[in-house]
């Protein structure tokens, strides 16, 4: 294809996507965190399709995706200066802000009848083009069956939702691999409702003040999604705190087929009969581990292993998002590496 005909082809696709949204269709789209399942956030029927396709509980609100800050005028009050500053630094990018919701511009189903709304401006070039061309707010949860690992490529979306959506926009794999940081900005100090690629320390540096973290063990999580089991393969999954070494004793029965997900450097401690998936190079390759985590969990899920162990990374600021997803996926089942 010449550059010109390539251009025309992309525009034709963007036009088709835009029209499909107008008709209330739901479409898988790439973002830099994970693939999203997108629909017109103003169209309640389309939003209902998202909830039923995913099997998602109706009390778990969706994140609204935009391409320009001016779109916020339609559904939030004037922004606090501190929020504007954070948006300037981190958008477009892997962070969502929870803001007070105003009016009935958005479908009340999309925000689960709350009086707040989570908003994000993705940086993925193709995801961003889709948002710019459609020029409407798109509600988009991760494009997986509820409870399963989120999709980091188009094939994952097809595996989960093939016959329940209009289509998936195929693009490169998500570079972050775990969902956006969710920051509750409805009260000060702001609170991290879900850790992600943007860390507490980065936020504190910009705000020049303390950011709290929501304790997601509490009875009433502020982020409704945090109370559900998440990201989990069908087999039991257990964290090995401190990782594997020569002394590690795995609590397994002789007949059980074992899977292990760990950094490459753990391979030397792992027997031939074990299915090993290398997550990243080293114990401190947190970004690489996050990028590969959901894919690894999906491979194990569809394999014949009976029980899965996963490396517990050191608890440092840069591993907070990664370890949050690992603990959620395991339901907090832990053994000591020895
Ligand atoms: O990276 C991401 O954020 C991806 C991509 C597709 O953008 N989306 C995503 O959406 O992870 P979802 O629906 O899987 O997760 C949204 C999270 C849930 O935990 C939900 O409870 C929380 O955000 N949330 C949304 N609106 C909220 C609100 N108004 N108050 C508190 N929590 C909210
Ligand atoms: Mg999700």
Image (tube, grey):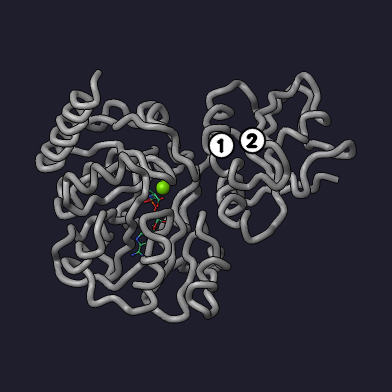
Q: Residues within 10 Å of mark 1 (few under 14, many from 20)?
A: many
Instruction: Determine the secondary structure under disc 1.
Output: helix
Please state if 334 lies on the left or on the right of 151 as rendered: right
Residue 209: percent from left, percent from top: 53, 80
Q: Which mark is residue 292?
A: 1
User: Residue at left 15%, top 55%?
Assistant: 42
User: Residue at left 65%, top 27%?
Assistant: 306
- Determine the image quadrant of residue 307: top right
Residue 213: percent from left, percent from top: 54, 69
Instruction: Determine the secondary structure under disc 2.
Output: loop
Label 1 vs label 2: CA separation?
Answer: 6 Å
- Determine the image quadrant of residue 121: bottom left
Please state if 119 lies on the left or on the right of 318 as rendered: left
> Residue 100 versus residue 230: which sits nearer the camera?
100
Q: Mark 2 points at which residue?
A: 279
> Residue 92 versus residue 200: which sits nearer the camera?
92
User: Residue at left 34%, top 72%?
Assistant: 84
> Residue 89 versus residue 50: which sits nearer the camera?
89
Residue 8: percent from left, percent from top: 16, 28
């Amino acid at each position: 294809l010449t550059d010109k005909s390539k251009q025309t082809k992309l525009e034709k696709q963007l036009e088709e996507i835009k029209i499909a949204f107008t008709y209330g269709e739901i479409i898988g789209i790439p973002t830099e965190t994970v693939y999203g399942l997108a629909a017109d956030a103003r169209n309640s029927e389309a939003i209902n399709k998202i909830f039923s396709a995913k099997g998602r509980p109706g009390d778990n609100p969706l994140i609204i995706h935009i391409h320009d800050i001016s779109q916020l005028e339609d559904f939030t009050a004037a922004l606090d200066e501190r929020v504007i500053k954070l948006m300037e630094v981190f958008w477009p990018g892997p962070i969502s802000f929870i803001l007070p919701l105003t009016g009935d511009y958005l479908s009340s189903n999309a925000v689960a009848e709350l009086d707040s709304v989570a908003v994000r401006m993705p940086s993925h070039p193709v995801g961003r083009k889709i948002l710019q061309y459609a020029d409407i707010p798109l509600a988009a949860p991760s494009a997986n069956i509820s409870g399963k690992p989120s999709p980091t490529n188009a094939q994952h979306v097809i595996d989960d939702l093939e016959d329940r959506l209009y289509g998936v926009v195929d693009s490169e794999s998500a570079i972050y691999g775990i969902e956006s940081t969710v920051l509750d900005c409805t009260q000060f100090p702001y609170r991290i409702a879900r850790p992600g690629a943007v860390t507490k320390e980065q936020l504190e540096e910009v705000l020049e003040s303390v950011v709290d973290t929501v304790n997601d063990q509490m009875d009433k999580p502020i982020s409704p999604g945090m109370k559900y089991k998440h990201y989990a393969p069908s087999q039991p999954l257990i964290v090995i705190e401190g990782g594997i070494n020569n002394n590690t004793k795995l609590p397994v029965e002789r007949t059980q087929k074992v899977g292990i997900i760990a950094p490459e450097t753990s391979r030397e401690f792992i027997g031939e009969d074990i299915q090993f998936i290398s997550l990243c190079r080293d114990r401190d390759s947190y970004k690489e581990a996050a990028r590969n985590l959901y894919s690894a969990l999906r491979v194990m899920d569809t394999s014949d292993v009976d029980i899965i162990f996963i490396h517990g990374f050191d608890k440092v600021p840069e591993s907070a998002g990664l370890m949050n997803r690992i603990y959620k996926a395991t339901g907090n089942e832990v053994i000591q590496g020895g």
